[in-house]
Amino acid sequence: MHREDPALLDIFAASVRDGRGRTLHRRLFAVETALSGEKKLHEPTVLLDIAPAPPGAAGPADEVTLPSRQSVEQYLYEQTLAPWGESVAGERLGEVQRIQRHVEISLNALIDRAQFQLAEYLNRQIEGQTVTGLDGLIAQAEQHLDTLNNRLESRRQELELEGHSSIADIKHLGRAWVTPHPERTNPDFAPMVRSDEIERIAIEAVTKHEEERGWVVESVESENRGFDLISRKPHPEDPLTFIEVRFIEVKGRAGVGIVALSENEYRTAERLKNDYWLYAVFNCAGKPEIHIVRNPARLGWQPVMAVEHYRIGPNELLHSEV
């Protein structure tokens, strides 16, 4: 509903595999290509905010040149997959090194014990002690020592392979032509259409409000996670430790009007419950006023199926403010 221009959306899946061919991670990725050719990345949850077009809807015009799948994949690899692979490789190498230290310590301790036992049996043999089944005990001790040494060498080789990882299984799952909603100018829906400038003012007002409370604010607006900000309250004696967190969805309005949540935002609010906070910022065209509601999913939202959004009037929201 908030889209002003059509664009192409490509969906990919990709994995990170280690040197033994085992999949460490697998994720979905979305790449949007604008008419200008400019590309940008989205979380796959962007699909939750897209409604199927009605039958007979027009596709891209004949004069529109769509990018090849290969060019989009190259952009995805350079912008996201390569850094993602490097990040996973660094984490994986640290994990493998910790495992390797444990393996070396534990198996070498067992090997030392087995060598000591074998040496004891061999000394008895050299000294000519008469021990029933001594030859068999020596053979068993030698076999046990060989098994431990082979296990150590095998585990070293496995860990060497596990310490290496790379991007694999890049698969193009499909593409869609995404257009502005045909009813976005309808008076019933127009108040729910996003204004980038109003949203910017609202985000700035909420960020300032949280920081003045002494909280640390992180923006996740570009990640399409179902909320805009993560606000954390530092521990009074350890500013690097946080004792409380809010997942904040910010909704800005030029005056006082209807507030709408997308499908993704509403479902996220349902899932997070009391950890999810709605900060509705009214009068952004003048002096912004912040109204805060905890767990907004408990309110009487009305689904707007034509655009797959949920909306609520300002009176219900103001009466539920915390």
Image (spheres, rainbow, N blue to C red):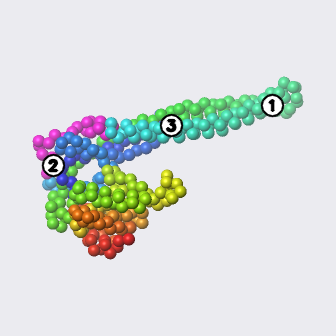
Cα–Cα gap, marks 2 and 3: 47 Å
Residue visible at 52% across and 39% down in the picture: 94
Q: Earlier in the sequence, mark 2 or mark 1?
A: 2
Q: Are marks 2 and 1 in contact (CB under 8 Å)?
A: no
Disc 3 is placed on an element classified as helix
Q: Please tell me in which quadrant of the rendered image residue 149 appears.
A: top right
Q: Earlier in the sequence, mark 2 or mark 3?
A: 2
Disc 1 marks a residue whose amino acid type is Glu
Q: Earlier in the sequence, mark 1 or mark 3?
A: 3
Q: Which residue is mark 2?
A: 59
Disc 2 is placed on an element classified as loop
Q: Position of residue 260 (x, y in %)?
A: 27, 64
Q: Which residue is mark 3?
A: 93
What label does residue 175 carry, if any?
none
What label does residue 120 carry, if any?
1
Locate residue 217 relative to residue 95 in the image: left or right: left
168 or 285: nearer the eye?
285
Disc 1 is placed on an element classified as helix
Cα–Cα gap, marks 1 and 3: 40 Å
Viewer can see residue 262: no
Q: Are marks 2 and 3 in contact (CB under 8 Å)?
A: no
Q: Residues within 10 Å of mark 3 (few under 14, many from 20)?
A: some
Image quadrant in which the N terminus is located: bottom left
